[in-house]
Amino acid sequence: MRRLAILVTAVFAIGGTAAYGATVAIGSWHLWAGTQTLTKGTCTVSGSSATTDTYVDSSHASNNFGNATTLQVKPDGNQTLWTFVRFDLSSCSLPTTGGADSATLKLFLNPAPNPGRTLTVTPVLSTWSQTLTWTQAQRLSYGAATTTFATGNTNGTTLSIPVTVDVDALIKSSTASYGWRISDTGAAAGGDKATFTSANASSNVPQLVISYEK
Amino acid sequence: MKTLSKTFGFVVVLAAVFASCAAAATLAIGSASLAAGSVTVSSCGVSSLVATRNVDNSGNVTQVNVTGIPTACSGETLSVTLTGAGNASVGGGSTTIGSCAPTCAATVTSLGGTTSAANVNGYSFAVTGQ
């Protein structure tokens, strides 16, 4: 009788283990799986033919400075200066199905303000040309500020300013790029003017460096 | 001896019954294959999916947008894995596909951490539901 009990117990144990150890319950499930592979690319835009840049001056509201070799920024006061810069991205053949991994605006600061300033980058949403004036700039459409950056006070410095979110949106929307306004919203002070090299200069011109995916 | 024979016979029958039950309810999974009886596993009509992602100004992925999902997939779960070098996962998340017509779009916003878009080489998708 004892042998019988042991045997029955063993059979139950083996049978139970085999049954439940390998059982997977599946109802009427839907299942689909797939992948998408991305291709990466880079594009650097610079030069006078691909760049439109200028600055405007509140104290000379009807003048344009599109042929200057500098771009200037100065806070509110007796003379406010705003810089405008935009790039023709057609040479990049950017896809509309991808987006920007990163986009960096590079500006060469010389001379630097002293002390350094914090400048604001704002996307421009309506068209403008190199002959833009202060008066005309008041009628342009602007988006929310993209970012701010510190100039530092070192002459001859290339500043790298991230504008990824704006370029990503441009790629997705396939809309024209009207670039950015760079302004100083801080309080006026001595030595507060920041000066950058424009596309009219022979070197250290503005650049837009884009890494993208498609 | 007669009692022992009867007992042995009983145990054999019992074992056979258990074995039958086990086989009927068992889905055998080997190391590389899957077998089932009358279980139905089908797709809700997906043939391919396309994703785009949004980034913040630092280039980190903030959300993944998936389009082209058939209406029949409404209510099912979409899982997206962001894959990097060597197809390793660098982030991902899932969402329930909402009601929509003629096709659905889904957005995954919780991606399990900060992922640089530069490190994303592709997406893996899974649509599951009952």
Image (cartoon, coloured by chain):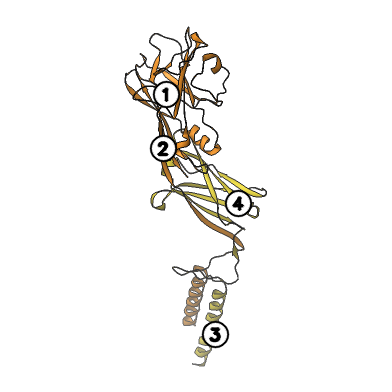
Chain colours: A orange, B yellow
Q: Position of residue B26 (x, y in %)?
A: 54, 71
Instruction: Label 1, secondary structure: give it.
Output: strand
Where is mark 4, residue-wise? Answer: B69
Q: Which chain's residue wears label 4?
A: B
Say whether disc 4 or disc 3 marks the residue closer to the N-terminus: 3
Name the residue: 49% across, 77% down: A11
**Front tag of 3 and 2:** 2
Tell which of A60 and A103 is nearer to you.
Answer: A60
Q: Position of residue B53 (x, y in %)?
A: 51, 42
Contact? badges 2 and 1 (CB < 8 Å) = no
Mark 3: which amino acid?
Answer: Phe
Where is mark 1, residue-wise? Answer: A149
Horizontal arrangement in the rendering, residue B128 relative to residue A4 (left or right): right
Q: Residues within 10 Å of mark 4 (few under 14, many from 20)?
A: many
Where is mark 2, residue-wise? Answer: A43
B40 up-or-down from A124: above or below? below
**Front tag of 4 and 2:** 2
